[in-house]
Image (cartoon, rainbow, N blue to C red):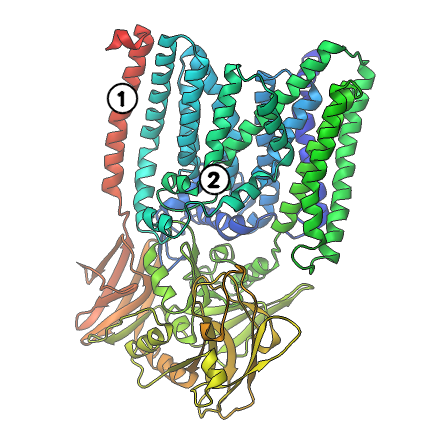
Amino acid sequence: MNRIKSHFRDKKNYYILASVITVLFLIIYACYGAFPFGTKTIAHYDMYHQVLPFVGLIFDMFSGKISPVFTNYLAGGANIVGFVCYMIFNPFYLLLLPFGKANLLYSINIVFIIQIIAIALTFLWFIRKYFRLNDILQITFAFAYAISPYVLFNYTWFTWLFLYMLMPILAHYFIKMLKTGKIWGFTLTVTAMIYNCYGIGLTGQAIIFIIATVFIFSMIKDNQHRKTSMFKMLISYGIAVCFALPLLGVNVMQLTEGSRIGSLFDNFIYGQLFGGISYNINYLVTDSIALVFTVLFVIKCNKHNKFNQFLFISLLLCAIPLLIDGIQLVLCLGSYYGYNMRLSYVLTFLMMITSMLYTKNIMRRHNNIAEEKIEKYTERSISIIFCVVILLVTLCLSIWHEFLSSSLSNACSGGLVLLVYSIMPVGFIAIMVWLLYNYLKGKVRVKVFYVIMSILFVFQSLSNMFIFTEQGFSSTKGVKFLQNQSIERNINYTDRLKDFSDDLGCDTHILTNFSSFACFASQINKVPVEFSRKLGYNVSNNALSSFGGTVLSDALFNYKYYYSTSEINYPHLNLVASEKHKEKTYYLYENMLTINNAILLPSSSNLQLGKNISDNIQALYEYMGGEGTVIKSTTLDLIISDPNNDIGQGTLVDDETKHQTVNIMFKSRDYNRIMYSSLDVFQEYCVLIPNSSALELNTESNSLESLGYVEKNKSDYEVGIQIVEPYNKKDKYEAKDITIYEINYDKVAQLIQSLNNQNVDFQYTKNGFKVTANSNNQKIVISNANINGNSITINGVKTEPNSLGLIELDLNDGENLIVSEFKFPYTKVLLIALVVGGLGLTILIVFNYCLIKYKTIKNIV
């Protein structure tokens, strides 16, 4: 019994901290209707669109549905080695597995709390080891670290959050390595950082290595000890890289084939050398209290103290990329990422240390003047009051923020909401200055200072926590609707799903058991991305969406089902299910104009795609066997000014806003058609409003926006297009930047029906597909991506696909059995990495043994 009491007495801060964080998040979940108090999920942005779907792939991998290296369910067949590596080495992703694939969107709410608690407890453990602070300040700083705005900004990836947890462990083992010469704790922590997130973890090590080098040269006086420590650190990093070399080699190879890889020099040329200063500094001041304490520490600290000099240099090293984004381009090998995603876990750790040191210095100076004695019961009362205040502040913040978001959600930019959030940091700083001034004058007691400062830290953290989580909660109803439909229809990845409203995200279909040609990931292969871009789909440098495109390309990609949050009036779409909720209604349509994954074409067919979407669609139509013209297009300025244009008559409408509005009356035709629009220039923001229904056009990719189906001989179909001001005020939209397209629906429908009469038997397999087709001087086109690793045989003879984004094969006369299996394409790279890593590991371990045995570098060489 005494042992239990002693344990709780020694560890009470851990239990208090974990309990406070748990209660706070449960209150937030309850306020916003998130699971377990509702159906919303904390998953948003990457967590919703990419992370959880890839965890879903892990479920399918363990159940034997897919292989560990390949899946047919993304981007027409995707190499998933990089995806799996991101998930499998992080324990917090593995915590999701017991909850089941269908509950991932709910279980993330629980595991997210566990992750934040783990970050807080790790930092508390570090504080107790190296800082002599009282209980209130220990809990305050640990809480402030875990709920720091810098941390919350990265909450969409557990891999990023895990680095915040590992940072205190890395610092501890670094100090231990310098004191004892034992390297394995530090080495394994560096390895864990790289394996957990080989992009950010490895990039951050460049700065950490420089900071550690500064520490060694500034803090170790003995020259021989300094040399030995430096060699120990070099050995540790060498071993860590050798451990990680197989993973790094494979993923570097995969990234070189990806669509996101950029040119270092291109990024410099296009102005990203200094372009992110405003954004990065704005990010830096989000944790205003820690920033103020850090600045005050730098100003007030003893400049002759070696450790203070080290901290100053370290903070400067972390601040340089804030001012020169070109440094990030070098660190990231040309692919630009925001500062907050790359080095914030190092910056946050250093800023919390400086904040604690400044607080500690203030305590020491005051205690030298007058020592205060407070009885135990008073100290306990203050602790209880502190916890109660936190809970009350949380509730008040919830009510306050709910009021702001509901009553002022439509406020213009620069309104009250922005004013309130901009004043908050100023208010914090003013209170802190007043508090510090009066404290140093002896007008404020020590414990009062503890409590007020703690509340300030916590209040700021909670403010940011509410802002980020309120923005981050997502509805799960659309995913649940599709999950239920996939079970009812026994889908199980056999048919592709088109996200017509762009509501789900590029990877979320994985959670619903539908397949899709979409994918969102840095490692996505550039082949299907470029092919889809040229056909008018919503595509960016690391996202391939099913949104956009035309009825013709949708048929080619076998989009058997359309998911939408609004009704679609296309004659080839049959409504098979709908589900109405308060905020929106979900619809599922079955597409009757699809091709079963493979079509036979004449051997002479050839497809060449360029930059013009209209020409590409016409080329695709002819390639698939169509005759005549299937698409017409005209820019919006000609629709307004030229009555003889091919599309219709446009009229400019004056309204009270500054936006340009055009109403278009389409010409009557003797055929049915579908109308589309696209923005032809790279701009940041545009809204098209067909039929008074606001639709946002993703302008990064020139994607096609459907303007609706127009029946033949109909001349009264009108659509309104409103062009709003761009996000970047330097840009300006004009009518000539928008193109209107008309596709002959009757010709497309006739072509698809004729292609479906072909006798082609297509089946997916675990690692590829099988096709049986009767050919007579023909080629076959399969709607899977032609990527590196596809091993294809025709009647047992290995063959290479033709140069098309999809798989295109020349067939023999008669019956052809086509088998495609994805084979891991980097086996040689992996073997070389294993051999080189193994040799390097052996050499470094032997060198470390000699260093221990002979004590000094001089005796070894």
**Front position in the image: 429 or 560:** 429
- The image shows residue 40, relative to residue 725, as above or below, that is above
Which labelled disc corresponds to residue 842? 1
Amino acid tagged 1: Thr
* 137 over 606 or under it: above or below: above
Instruction: Indicate whether 529 appears above or below 335.
Output: below
**Dot 2: within a 10 Å radius of its alpha carbon, few (fewer than 14), some, or many (20 or more) residues?**
some
Can residue 558 be seen here? yes
Q: Which residue is under mark 2? A: 323
10 Å crowding of disc 1: few (<14), some (14-19), many (20+): some
State the image coordinates of residue 833 (x, y, percent, origin top left).
26, 35
Marks counted in the figure total 2
Q: Residue at x 46, y 14 (%)?
A: 219
> Could you tell whether 681 is left or right of 440 in the image?
left
- Quarter holding residue 744: bottom left
Residue 84 sits in quarter: top left
Of the numbered discs 2 and 1, the one sitting upstream in the chain is 2
Which of 76 and 302 lies nearest the eye of the viewer? Answer: 302
State which quadrant residue 834 falls in: top left
Q: Residue at x 40, y 23 (%)?
A: 187
Q: Residue 480: x percent and y percent?
A: 58, 58
For the point 42% across and 48% down, the residue is 272
The answer, for residue 33, to whether it is visible in the render is no
Q: Which element is circle 1 on? A: helix
